[in-house]
Image: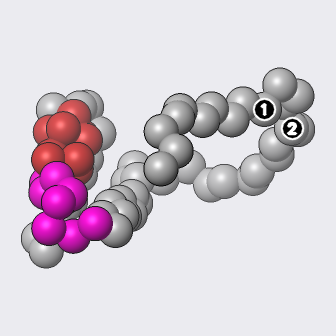
Amino acid sequence: MVDCVMLRKNVKTAPVSANVPSSPVINLLVVVARPDEERDVGYRTISRPLIKLIDNSRYISELPST
């Protein structure tokens, strides 16, 4: 068994250009991968802080129930 930490970092910044129209709504899809099923933390443990942050922000949010 190998036990180690791996870190990847891009040292060169890539030029990014996008023409995005302004919108009062931000659509966000959160995908929580849990490959170890029973031994993984609950998906809400990961997504709940993000949802609370969005709810408490100045932005309009419409969160679908799942």
Q: Nearer the viewer, residue 13 or 20?
A: 13
Residue 30 visible somewhere in the drawing: yes
Residue that mark 2 sits on: 14
Q: Nearer the viewer, residue 9 or 66?
A: 9
Q: Secondary structure at mark 2?
A: loop
Residue at 78% in and 32% down: 10
The three-letter code of the residue at mark 1 reads Asn
Residue 42 on the magenta segment: yes
Where residue 7 sits, quadrant-wise, is: top right
Q: Secondary structure at mark 1?
A: loop
Crowd around label 1: few <14 · some 14–19 · many ≥20 (10 Å): few
Range of residues picked out in magenta: 36-44
The three-letter code of the residue at mark 2 reads Ala
Where residue 17 sits, quadrant-wise, is: top right
Q: Which image quadrant: the C terminus?
A: bottom left
Crowd around label 2: few <14 · some 14–19 · many ≥20 (10 Å): few
Residue that mark 1 sits on: 10
As measured in the structure, the alpha-carbon distance from the residue carrying label 1 to the one carrying label 2 is 9 Å
Residue at 88% in and 28% down: 12
Camera-near label (1 vs 2) is 1
Q: Position of residue 59 (x, y in %)?
A: 29, 39
Circles 1 and 2: CB atoms closer than 8 Å: yes
Horizontally, residue 46 falls left or right of residue 4, namely left
Q: Position of residue 44 (x, y in %)?
A: 13, 54
Residue 55 visible somewhere in the drawing: no
Q: Position of residue 15 (x, y in %)?
A: 88, 38
Mark sitting on residue 62: none
Residue at 14% in and 47% down: 45
Where residue 40 sits, quadrant-wise, is: bottom left
Q: Nearer the viewer, residue 59 or 65?
A: 65
Residue 37 on the magenta segment: yes
Horizontally, residue 4 falls left or right of residue 48, namely right
